[in-house]
Image: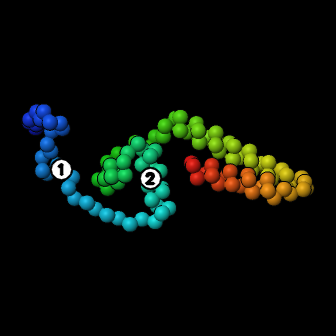
């Protein structure tokens, strides 16, 4: 059944009152939950509202990640792994422990993981 929508020269057609999203629902989440929801929205390429509405209404969500983004993440993880190996090699070889170098590497690791 096709619905007639009149032409509106002023822009987007007016929605039927039953189709207009006028109800606001709230939910409290922890900062970690908020970060995870935002990450999943980003991966799905959806706004938070669209993402949560789709979940609540059992609609399918395409969460396949952008290949370019995955390539960047793999490269960052490789760098992190390399730094961890350098730290382990230095500690296990009995070399003099350079605390300042360790702090710089740890700071870089934390920043890189937070960006992911």
Q: Nearer the viewer, residue 99 or 56?
A: 99
Q: Give the residue displayed 73% in from the left and 52% down from the top.
A: 105
The numbered dot on residue 20 is: 1
Secondary element at tag 1: loop
Q: Which one is earlier in the sequence, the residue at label 1 or at label 2?
A: 1
Q: Give the residue displayed 14% in from the left and 36% down from the top.
A: 10
Q: Give the residue displayed 25% in from the left and 60% down from the top.
A: 24
Q: Residues within 10 Å of mark 2 (few under 14, many from 20)?
A: some
Is residue 55 at all visible to an observer of this figure?
A: no
Quarter of the figure with residue 78: top right
From the image, tell me which residue sits under label 2. Answer: 38
Above or below residue 97? Residue 3 is above
Q: Percent position (x, y) of residue 75?
A: 64, 39
Q: Give the residue displayed 81% in from the left and 58% down from the top.
A: 99
- Please state if 28 lies on the left or on the right of 6 as rendered: right
Q: Nearer the viewer, residue 106 or 52?
A: 106
Furthest toward the front, the residue is: 10
Q: Residues within 10 Å of mark 1 (few under 14, many from 20)?
A: few
Q: Percent position (x, y) of residue 19?
A: 17, 49
Secondary element at tag 2: helix
- Rounded to the nearest whole Å, what is the CA distance between mark 1 and mark 2? 25 Å
The numbered dot on residue 106 is: none
- Please state if 58 lies on the left or on the right of 65 as rendered: left
Q: Nearer the viewer, residue 90 or 98?
A: 98
Q: How is the model colour-coded?
A: rainbow
Q: Percent position (x, y) of residue 52?
A: 35, 54
Above or below residue 34? Residue 40 is above
Is residue 13 at all visible to an observer of this figure?
A: yes
- Please state if 83 lies on the left or on the right of 93 as rendered: left
Quarter of the figure with residue 8: top left
């Amino acid at each position: 059944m096709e619905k007639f929508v009149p032409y509106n020269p002023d822009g987007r057609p007016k929605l039927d009152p039953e189709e207009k999203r006028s109800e606001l629902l709230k939910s409290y989440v922890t900062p970690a939950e908020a970060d995870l929801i935002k990450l999943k929205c980003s991966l799905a390429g959806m706004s938070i509202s669209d993402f949560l509405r789709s979940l609540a209404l059992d609609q399918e969500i395409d969460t396949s990640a952008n290949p370019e983004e995955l390539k960047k993440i793999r490269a960052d993880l490789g760098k992190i792994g390399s730094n961890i190996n350098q730290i382990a090699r230095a500690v296990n070889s009995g070399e003099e422990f350079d605390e300042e170098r360790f702090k710089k590497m740890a700071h870089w690791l934390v920043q890189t993981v937070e960006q992911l």
